[in-house]
Image: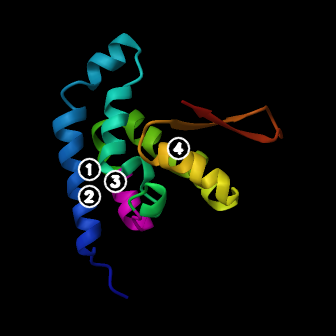
Amino acid sequence: MDFELTAEQELARRTARDFAEAEIAPVIARYDEAEEFPAELIAKLGALGFMGALFPPELGGAALDYVAYALVVEELSRVDGSVGITMWAHNSLCTNAIYQAGTEAQKRRYLPKLAGGEWIGRTASTGPGGEMTRLLEG
């Protein structure tokens, strides 16, 4: 078994690392102190394709494999855990649920805006043992 990263995986990791160091690190303390959501940073992640990391280009995604995806989450989280987990939750919990179980019409309607970072996907639980509800914020 070959454990070397592919060129695409290395590129995803390097892009995420460079972004995190250049864009997140200099400003994240200001967001934290103000208790403000870093919407501008999330929009930039969308422009890089990371808010649609797992999804095909025809739906606005970057079509990364799961190793590249994990590397991106790791690099973002290395600089700021809240940005990394926001990107992860958006992709895995919300957007992937629509991609895996949504109708074609739902995928065409929601995924391009989610993948591009125009909308941010979230999930919420209704309580212990409750049904998972998907929320979209536009």
Q: Is the residue under label 1 in contact with that under label 3 (CB below 8 Å)?
A: yes
Q: Is the residue under label 2 in contact with that under label 1 (CB below 8 Å)?
A: yes
Q: Find disc 4 in the rendering and name its residue.
A: 89
The residue positioned 44% from the left and 65% from the top of the image is: 66
- What whole-number distance in Å separates the C-alpha atoms at marks 1 and 2? 5 Å
| Mark sitting earlier along the chain (3/2) | 2
- What whole-number distance in Å separates the C-alpha atoms at marks 1 and 4? 17 Å
The residue positioned 81% from the left and 35% from the top of the image is: 128
Classed neighbour count for the residue bearing mark 4: other residues with Cα under 10 Å, few (<14), some (14–19), many (≥20): some
Picture disc at residue 72? 3
Disc 3 residue type? Val
The residue positioned 61% from the left and 54% from the top of the image is: 107
- The C terminus - image quarter: top right
Disc 2 residue type? Arg
Magenta residue check for 70: yes
Q: Which residues are magenta?
A: 63-73
Q: Position of residue 108 (x, y in %)?
A: 58, 53
| Mark sitting earlier along the chain (3/1) | 1
Element assignment for label 2: helix
- Residue 20 versus residue 74: which sits nearer the camera? 20
Q: Find disc 1 in the rendering and name its residue.
A: 16
Q: Find disc 2 in the rendering and name its residue.
A: 13
